[in-house]
Every structure is written in C-alpha cells, then in structure tokens.
Amino acid sequence: MVDAGAHRAHDDFMDHTTGQKTKNIGILLFDGMEELDAVGPWEVLAAWADQFPEDGWAVQLISRDGEPVRCAKGMVISPMCSIDTAPDLEVLVHPGGDGTLPLMSDQAHLEWLRGQRAKVPLMTSVCTGSLVYAAAGLLEGRPATTWWGALDTLAETDPTIELRTSDRFVDDGDVVTASGVSAGIDMALHLVVRLAGESRAKDVRRYIQYDPQPPV
Amino acid sequence: MVDAGAHRAHDDFMDHTTGQKTKNIGILLFDGMEELDAVGPWEVLAAWADQFPEDGWAVQLISRDGEPVRCAKGMVISPMCSIDTAPDLEVLVHPGGDGTLPLMSDQAHLEWLRGQRAKVPLMTSVCTGSLVYAAAGLLEGRPATTWWGALDTLAETDPTIELRTSDRFVDDGDVVTASGVSAGIDMALHLVVRLAGESRAKDVRRYIQYDPQPPV
C-alpha cells in the first residue's frame, strides 16, 4: 500500500523564498526501541515541521540499514533513510528501550554516535537512550538523566555523570537527556522552544491538545 | 529485517494455567491516522499486556487489508493483521487524524464499524476518531468529545450528540471518546483502570514514567 522509502526523502533542498536550506532533526529507530520514546518526540516535532513549514525544519526517521525495525512492544515502524543516506542533522534524538542493551556494547554504533557528536550541534536522548550516549563517552562529567529504572545503570556506565534523578529532562546545552518514555514529549516541546521560541511550542502543544490529566 | 505479519499473531490461545482465553484489544490503523492517536494508547496498553501477562490481555494492530499504513505526519507503521484475520475484540480503539475525513463517507468502513459495535463490548476513539463513530451512527444521543478543532464538525455530523467540550475523555459505558491526540494516553490509562483496576493502571503509569511536565 505504501512505499516506505519514498516519502519525505531528506527535504534537503533550498527554499527559494527565504534562501534557507531545510534543517533536519533525525530520530533514530532500532530494534527493541520503546515505541513512545520515538513516537512522542516524532509527534511533537513532525507536527511542528508540518504545520509550520515556514520555520524550515524537517524530521527524519533513520534506521541503521534503512530497513524497518521491530520495537520493544512489537510495533513495526519503517524509516525514511539509513544512517548512510540521512542528511546532515541539526538535532539527533536517540530513543531508549530494551534494544539499548546490545547497542551499549556495539562498537560500530558507538563509533557512529561519536561521529555524530562531532558534527551534530544538539544530541538528545529519551529514556535509556542516555545509557548508549554514556557508553559512547558522550556524557562524561555532565548532568544527565534516564528512565527511573535505569538510573543505577547510568551511574555505573559512567561514574563521572552528575545524576539528575528527579528532572523530567536535563538541558546541558549541546546535550539534552530526558527521563523515561513519556518524558520525550516534554523534551521535544522544550526543543521547539529552543529552536523556534515559546510561542511556537505553545502552538504545537495546542495542536496535540497536550493538557495531560493522568486518571491515576 | 523484520517480518511484520508474523509477530504476536492473535495470541488467540487458551492459558492452561488459568483456563482463560486471551482477551484482545484492537487498535485500528489507517492511512492519514495521526501517529500519537494510535501509539499513545498502544504504549499504555501494550506495556500493560507485556509487563503483566497474568492479566491475560493482548493488543492487536489492525489495518483494513493487513498492509502498512502511512500516517498523517509520514510515519509508516505495519499492522499485525487485517480486519478479516483479526481475532474477536473486547475493545476497539479508533484513532483520529486527517485520514478520518474519507472514512466518514466510506460506506464499507462505516458498515464494518456497525458490525464491530454489535459484537465488541467497548468501543473507544481518540481525537477525530469520534467523527467516524458519529458518521456510523454510534454516538446518537450520547455524550462524546473529540479534538478541539473538530468539535463543530462532531456536532454537525450528529446533532443529537451531547458535546463535552472540556472533558479529557468521556466514558459513556460501552463507548469512550477522548479529546485530541495526546488524550489517548489518559484514556488508555482509564481503560486499564476499568479492565484491571487502579493499582494496575498505576503500575503502567509508573512504567512509562507518565509524570507530565509540559514546559510551555
């Protein structure tokens, strides 16, 4: 019914009205990724990019090999590109989930992350995504957080990290780490504040009717 | 990399420990569906089913023809089954999104929904999913809600509906309608309360660390 690879390919073009090149946010997809870790930020950021094209942003879903991934709870999501065909990114979002465990000792992945760190201005994570950043050495001496159930593992992975155990997300300038799963929604709204201002972030919040009322 | 159709096929088996048959929740996927409308409830409900298998529930992602769908913001998600191969459901979740507009006049879809209504005990919707329920006549004379931007359309689609313009979700017994996009998360937690009790819903809330702190 759909051709997964064809849509939104890069948007890597010059806007001839403004003379500005589209800026890209990449969300990494991988097997065992927790679904909402990725789709929460996706909803916020893609709604922003889609509803306000004048801001000049696009969001890319990226898997290592460009093939679909099977998430932690069984949902299968198709990416738009691979790490080799992805455009240069202004922001990377690394979700968490059980699939981060193998990634923490996957030298090719950690090397790719260090390469991204060298050229992506803003590296962000959701949930146990920060464990992978820690394993890659990206959080050395920095304040950071993760899913509540993984705080000990984060501390063990890099004891130089200043654990922020009760923060919803931690903005350390060029690295932002969020706490568990649903925290990616709040972090993504914060990214919209940083990248486009508070008024725009309020627009996006209203669009997704984000007036949470947990019933328990 | 993955075989989308093979995973979690139905779980339509007898648990020989408890003698109970697995109960199924179906989340409908369709082209133009708003991503978080489906993935918010999916995260809550699939995390519940996965973390607490003793409760005996499974969650099915269902598309009409069993093929992947392209969502409103461009994400491509694969279902587990088609409407013809799906197991009998205890709960149906109908997401919203721009893709509801063609569904509101799609007689085959509306007829399928009426057929589901006749046999599914609990019919639920997120966002503009309720517009489709209204078009199928399922909300006649009932209290209901929808995404804030579609309240007028809901009233026009069925003037007998008692609009609940400020409710996060409306529980009318065998029909539950949620407001826009992110409200599906709150509604899904409410469904866990109804189906497994408040304590279990708190477990799931904690698992997804749903302590929302919108930054704007």
Image (cartoon, coloured by chain):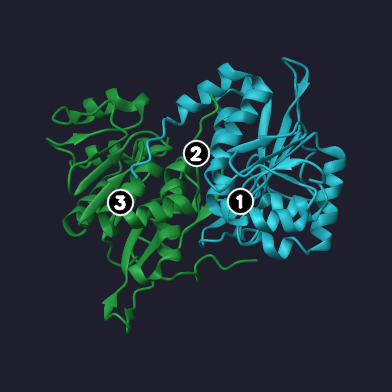
Chain colours: A cyan, B green
Height in image: B54 above or below B39?
A: below
Report the residue at 27% width, 81% height from top: B19
Local SS, label 3: helix
Q: Residue furthest bottom?
A: B16
Local SS, label 1: loop
Which x, y percent locates residue A26?
A: 70, 41
What is the spatial separation of the Cα atoms under label 3 and label 1, in whole angstroms?
A: 32 Å
Dot 3: few (<14), some (14–19), or many (≥20) neighbours within 10 Å?
many
Which x, y percent locates residue A202?
A: 52, 21
Badge 2 amino acid: Ala
Badge 3 amino acid: Leu
| Residue A64 seen by the camera | no
Q: Nearer the viewer, residue A170 or B92?
A: A170
Residue highlighted by disc 1: A4
Height in image: B127 above or below B76?
A: above
Height in image: A84 above or below B211?
A: below
Q: Which quarter of the rendered picture does the C terminus of chain A lie within?
A: top left
Q: Callout 2: residue from which chain?
A: B
Do the residues bearing badges 2 and 3 touch, measured as CB atoms within 8 Å?
Answer: no
Q: Callout 3: residue from which chain?
A: B
| Residue A163 seen by the camera | yes
Residue highlighted by disc 3: B191
Residue A65: which quarter of the image? bottom right
Residue highlighted by disc 2: B72
What is the spatial separation of the Cα atoms under label 1 and label 2, in whole angstroms?
A: 14 Å
Q: Nearer the viewer, residue A110 or A159?
A: A159
